[in-house]
Image (cartoon, rainbow, N blue to C red):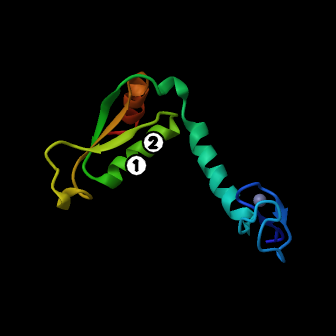
Amino acid sequence: MSDERLLCPACSNTYPPSERFCEDCGMPLVHADAPATQASERRKTARKINPQYAEGRLVKVARAESGPEAEFIAGLLLEEGIPSMVRRAGGFDVAEFLAAGPREVLVPESGAQAAREALDFQSD
Ligand SMILES: [Zn+2]
């Protein structure tokens, strides 16, 4: 909590907390720590993805019984560097099933083999 500086979101100039607006571009200043933290989280996620696993058409590698289960699988795959996409399984287009319906987890073709191995390792 020692860093009390304010930051211009447009040009990244920093100012003491007595200032309200950027002298250069007039943008309202924000606290210096908040946006930087979010940006580093995004970088962390992006760095996890292995570009080698991000090529080709999407293929289905797993089926989940619910959205949260699918998100869990997607998280496991990301730990292996494999980007994935979750979509509702066919036949559940009614709005009531949006949260609860089964899901399919898809990954790029080049990551499918690694994804199946990662998921086999997890299943019983
Ligand atoms: Zn500025």
Q: Is residue 6 above or below residue 73?
A: below
Q: Which residue is mark 2?
A: 76
Q: CA distance from mark 1 to mark 2?
A: 6 Å
Name the foreground residue: 42 vs 18.
18
- Left/right of residue 75 with respect to residue 57 in the rendered view: right
- Left/right of residue 28 with respect to residue 112 in the rendered view: right
| Local secondary structure at mark 1 | helix
Q: Which residue is mark 1?
A: 72
- Please tell me which residue is depicted at 45% across the width and 23% down the height of the picture: 55
- Please tell me which residue is depicted at 66% across the width and 50% down the height of the picture: 40
Indicate the quadrant where residue 107 lies: top left
Labelled disc at residue 28: none
Tell me residue 19's x, y (percent). Answer: 82, 74
- Left/right of residue 95 with respect to residue 77 in the rendered view: left
Indicate the quadrant where residue 68 lies: bottom left
- Please tell me which residue is depicted at 62% across the width and 45% down the height of the picture: 44
- Mark 1 crowdedness (10 Å alpha carbons): few <14, some 14-19, many ≥20: few
Tell me residue 34's x, y (percent). Answer: 68, 64
* Tag 1–tag 2 contact (CB < 8 Å): yes
Q: Is residue 77 above or below residue 24?
A: above
The amino acid on which the numbered mark 2 sits, given as a three-letter code, is Leu
Q: Quadrant of ligand 1?
A: bottom right
Name the foreground residue: 21 vs 52.
21
Image quarter where the C terminus lies is top left
Name the foreground residue: 54 vs 67.
54
Image quarter where the N terminus lies is bottom right
Residue that lies at the very extreme toward the bottom in this rendered image? 18
Tell me residue 63's x, y (percent). Answer: 27, 40
The amino acid on which the numbered mark 1 sits, given as a three-letter code, is Phe
